[in-house]
Image (cartoon, rainbow, N blue to C red):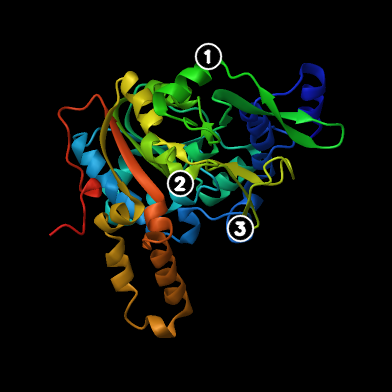
């Protein structure tokens, strides 16, 4: 991408976070500027919502419980950051419309941060969704599903006992790794969370959690934030088995570590440090209400009921077969079911609600 190359030529090597920001979000040539063609079975990767409406219906069931915890306010704002193609919005709103019309009538749904191409697709798929900035001081719920894995990350490593930052340079023909001095903020983060603590270890560091939670804070006066993403606690994220970190590039449903190639043509992601996210949230007055895995969350919110409804005659109906296979994919413990985690936060609440979606459906 010429913009990145020119910036390096002018100013010298840049951080990987800057490289990732431009590679993904440059308005003209960034990966997400291409719009919905990047997502789904014909794109580079699948999200949970791409696998059918059962996921959205399960999230809708959780929203019903959150609404009850908020004493059924006159208006319930659902604010989705990184709404993709609008599939979750469509399926969630349709589930509320058909099962709980009273709540559906009070819901305002806003999709934030969509690129121009995505906005056009959302307007087509979910015309009831408001596109634009989030409301202020609302009562409701933030939805951040598969958002934080695309937050720009710095790359660091421990070499010769010293902490180094792995930046990006230009050798005249291609982008290359370049060692740069880590900022004081990056050093503090690495020390606090144990990132790249041992010799030869590499790790990714996202420093943008505070800015993201600031947006929650402005949008919600009383309510929840539901975060679904792949990641883990800092202790597990920076464990010995992840000596080379978690950064991956995705293209055509395949992963690669060629992060500096095909710039703007492949997705870049890293596992979420939920410990750092929680620290940023608690610093701003949010409380962690609980965490679970995607399979437990979906089962607790009734997705197996969907599965059983499709059982009768499923072997004769190709559509039902696909729907059942999609649900299996969402909850399979060796795949998406345990790879993705759900963390729910609360702000301005009376007490600490015990949410059914956070309960263990396998407990006896």
Q: Position of residue 211 (x, y in %)?
A: 47, 22
Residue 184 image label: 1
Q: Which residue is tagged 2? A: 241
- Closest to the camera, between mark 1 and mark 2, is 2
Q: Which mark is residue 258?
A: none
- Looking at the image, can residue 94 be seen? no
- Mark earlier in primary sequence (3, 2): 2
Whether the residues at callouts 1 and 3 have beta carbons within 8 Å, the answer is no
User: Residue 298: percent from the left, percent from the top?
Assistant: 31, 55
- Asked whether the beta carbons under mark 1 and mark 2 sit within 8 Å of each other, the answer is no
Point 51% across, 16% down: residue: 185
Q: Which mark is residue 253?
A: 3
**Closer to the camera, 320 or 96?**
320
The quadrant holding residue 291 is top left
**Label 1 vs 2, first from the N-terminus:** 1
Circle 1: element type = helix
Q: CA distance from mark 1 to mark 3?
A: 37 Å
Is disc 3 placed on a helix, strand or loop? Answer: loop
Q: Is residue 159 visible?
A: yes
Numbered marks: total? 3
Q: Quadrant of the N terminus?
A: top right
What residue do we see at 41% from left, 27% from top?
193
């Amino acid at each position: 991408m010429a913009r990145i190359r020119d910036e390096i030529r002018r100013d010298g090597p840049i951080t990987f976070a800057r490289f990732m920001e431009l590679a993904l979000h440059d308005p003209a040539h960034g990966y997400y500027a291409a719009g919905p063609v990047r997502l789904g079975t014909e794109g580079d990767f699948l999200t949970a919502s791409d696998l059918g409406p059962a996921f959205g219906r399960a999230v809708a069931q959780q929203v019903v419980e959150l609404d009850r915890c908020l004493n059924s306010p006159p208006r319930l704002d659902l604010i989705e950051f990184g709404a993709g193609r609008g599939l979750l919005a469509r399926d969630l709103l349709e589930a509320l419309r058909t099962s709980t019309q009273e709540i559906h009538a009070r819901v305002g749904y806003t999709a934030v941060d969509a690129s121009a191409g995505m906005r056009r697709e959302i307007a087509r798929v979910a015309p009831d969704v408001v596109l634009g900035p989030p409301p202020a001081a609302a009562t409701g719920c933030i939805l951040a599903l598969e958002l934080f894995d695309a937050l720009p990350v710095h790359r660091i490593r421990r070499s010769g006992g010293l902490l180094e930052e792995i930046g990006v340079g230009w050798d005249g023909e291609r982008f290359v790794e370049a060692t740069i001095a880590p900022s004081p903020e990056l050093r503090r983060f690495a020390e606090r969370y144990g990132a790249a603590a041992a010799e030869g270890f590499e790790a990714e560091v996202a420093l943008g959690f505070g800015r993201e939670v600031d947006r929650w804070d402005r949008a919600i006066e009383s309510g929840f934030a539901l975060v679904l993403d792949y990641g883990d606690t800092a202790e597990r994220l920076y464990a010995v088995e992840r000596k080379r970190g978690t950064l991956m590039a995705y293209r055509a449903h395949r992963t690669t570590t060629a992060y500096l190639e095909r710039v703007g043509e492949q997705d870049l992601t890293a596992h979420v440090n939920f410990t750092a996210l929680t620290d940023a949230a608690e610093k701003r007055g949010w409380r962690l209400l609980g965490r679970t895995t995607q399979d437990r969350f979906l089962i607790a919110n009734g997705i197996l009921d969907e599965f059983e409804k499709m059982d009768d005659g499923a072997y004769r109906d190709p559509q039902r077969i696909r729907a059942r296979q999609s649900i299996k994919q969402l909850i399979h413990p060796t795949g998406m079911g345990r790879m993705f985690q759900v963390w729910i936060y609360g702000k301005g609440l009376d007490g600490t609600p015990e949410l059914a979606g956070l309960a263990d459906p396998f407990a006896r």
